Image: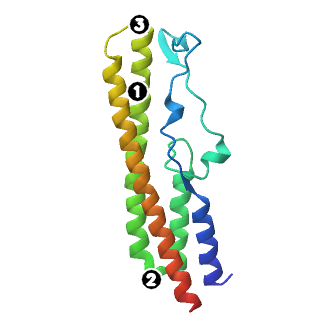
Amino acid sequence: MNTSSQITQILKTVKSFKVVQCQMHHEKVVVDTHGKPMFNSIENALVFKRVNLCKAAIRQKRLGCAHSSSNLNFEYILDDLKTIVPHCTRQISELKKEFKTIVSKIYAIDHKVGNVEHEIANSVLNDFFGKDKLEGNLHFLKIEHKELMQLLLGVKADIEQLINSEINYITN
């Protein structure tokens, strides 16, 4: 396979990945018909039932998803790209570093959202005060997540632009 074909294939693969504003729906606690959180008690600890994750096949192509290997697979593609166009190694490495930084922040927010959802469920279950404050915290975390997903989309677009530039350079 020649360089042009390899780069074109990588572009196709990169474009197959999506950035989806899921708002971490999977962290939400399932409630019964009365609005009470559903849970199991395991060794005196409450384990709340969560909304199911997206299907694995969908998660495999969702960048930013904290529950799949899609981000790592995307990094491998960037490593392959460095091999095919070594004169772009610095640019690709910078984009990869930016990608990894954003993804790490998304993972941290995903964890925080899971904890806040747990605290909200606890407050509902035990009639604690503070649910409004927790929901406010959740709202701000989701805004931050949305902003990070936008940044991730921008990095992906920059990678696609770099690849398109290389394709245009090679074919002209």
The image quadrant that residue 98 belongs to is bottom left
Task: Tell us which disc is closer to us: 3 or 2.
Answer: 3
Q: Is residue 52 above or below residue 40?
A: below
Q: Mark 1 or 3 closer to N-term? A: 1
Task: Tell us which disc is closer to us: 1 or 2.
Answer: 1
Q: Residue 129: x percent and y percent?
A: 32, 11
Q: Say few, some or many: other residues with alpha carbon within 10 Å of mark 1 (under 14 / 14 to 19 / 20 or more).
A: some
**Amino acid under disc 3:** Asn
Element type at marker 2? helix
> What residue sits right under mark 2 in the picture?
87
In whole angstroms, how far apart are the C-alphas of marks 1 and 3?
16 Å
| Residue drawn 54% across the image and 14% down it | 39
**Amino acid under disc 1:** Asn
In whole angstroms, how far apart are the C-alphas of marks 1 and 2?
44 Å
> What residue sits right under mark 1 in the picture?
115
Q: Mark 3 or 2 closer to N-term? A: 2
Q: In front here: 86 or 54?
A: 54
Q: Is residue 149 above or below residue 120?
A: below
> What residue sits right under mark 3 in the picture?
126
The image quadrant that residue 31 belongs to is top right
Total labels drawn: 3
Q: Residue 69: x percent and y percent?
A: 56, 49
